[in-house]
Image (cartoon, helix red, strand yellow):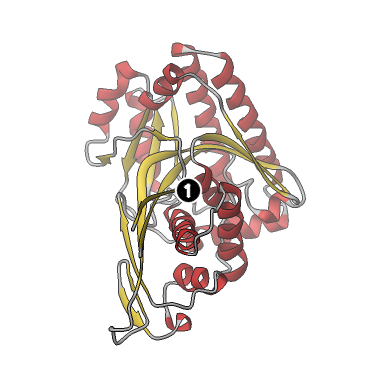
Amino acid sequence: MMIISKTPVRISLFGGGTDYPDYFKRDKGAVLGTTINKYIYLSVNKLSSFFDYKIKVSYSLSEKVESIEDIQHPSIRECLKYKEMTQGLDIHHFADLPARTGLGSSSSFTVGLLNAIHKLQDHKASKEILAKEALHIEQNLICERVGSQDQVHAAYGGLNIIEFNQDGHQVTPLDISQEKQELIENSLLLFYTGINRYANDILEEQIKNTKAGSKDAFLKRMYEMVYEAKEIILNLDGPELIQKLGSLLHKSWEHKKRLSSKISNNSIDNYYSLAKDAGAIGGKLCGAGHGGFLLLMVPSKKQDQVRHSLQDLLEVDFKFDREGSQIIYQQ
């Protein structure tokens, strides 16, 4: 039996940083973001007894092992242990974009693998279950330094506000017209900086500051911006919507950079300044920071100028995804 799951990555627009338990367990957190049509694919196939190994996993490395405990990949190992998988398995990973680039691909991996395992076990996993299990595995079993939005985005899909408190999370889709969605989509440009980084390394200082409460004023303001962005998206249209949303995105990026000295660097700051000088209204680095993808909000008439100013970077065309993690093949 073979199962293939397809799980989107995400772009976070507002509120990133307030989704860490060290913050939202003492104050409320919220993010506004969307999944996009770039995906993590995972195939999970039952392995017959003819092979001289019990489990094979293929990602950037290839592993053939006799025991789940011997698997090096932490998400695969802990997902299989948590779901009490006992039969032989062959697991393969494919992706539209590289890992460690700030689009939540590691959490999309975990959600997609859990979705495939549920299907293999003949279970119907809800979006809520997938998100909760992925959060448990990444935060409690692997003990990754990760927030709580990526897992929820990957499971649910769509343009959402996700609210966090000590009792859990709540997902509220932003119900907008197809025309307005396309306006926002077409005003966002995504550029790959070419800088890969491990989020754990970047987040150490930020999490230390968050635990100490020294950045609470910035985080509270970033939380408020989520709801300001919601009002802009729901109540405005056309050029006014893009201008105000882009300006708020710029303010949010300025606040995010104050959470840690490692979120930006000279190279990123230079690219951002070039884009602003060419006509971008605002933008941000996706994810933990320091590298990965640079997201910019740019009016259509200025986009060619911005592309020219960032011609050294690779642009990635994208659209919003509405579905979240899906099973696309079963046999």
In the rendered image, which quarter contains the N terminus?
bottom left
Can residue 147 be seen here? The reply is: no
* Residue tagged 1: 287
The residue at the point 57 percent across, 19 percent down is 234
Above or below for 213 versus 234: below
Q: Secondary structure at mark 1?
A: loop
Q: State which quadrant residue 276 falls in.
A: top left
The residue at the point 63 percent across, 52 percent down is 20
Where residue 110 appears, x then y in whole percent? 47, 60
Q: Nearer the viewer, residue 249 or 184?
A: 184
Q: State which quadrant residue 248 falls in.
A: top right
The residue at the point 36 percent across, 33 percent down is 319
In the rendered view, does 157 fall on the left or right side of 57?
Answer: right
> Three-letter amino acid code at disc 1?
Gly
Above or below for 224 versus 23: above
Where residue 83 appears, x then y in whole percent? 54, 69
Where residue 258 appears, x then y in whole percent? 58, 45
Residue reaching furthest to the right: 26
Q: Nearer the viewer, residue 115 or 104?
A: 115
Can residue 31 be seen here? The reply is: yes
In the rendered image, which quarter contains the C terminus?
bottom left
Where residue 169 appears, x then y in whole percent? 67, 46
Q: State which quadrant residue 203 falls in.
A: bottom right
In the rendered view, does 235 fall on the left or right side of 87?
Answer: right
Above or below for 226 versus 27: above
The mark tally for this picture is: 1
Above or below for 301 versus 34: above
Q: Nearer the viewer, residue 55 or 234?
A: 55
In the rendered view, does 182 fall on the left or right side of 254?
Answer: left
Q: Nearer the viewer, residue 43 or 317?
A: 43
Q: Residues within 10 Å of mark 1 (few under 14, many from 20)?
A: many
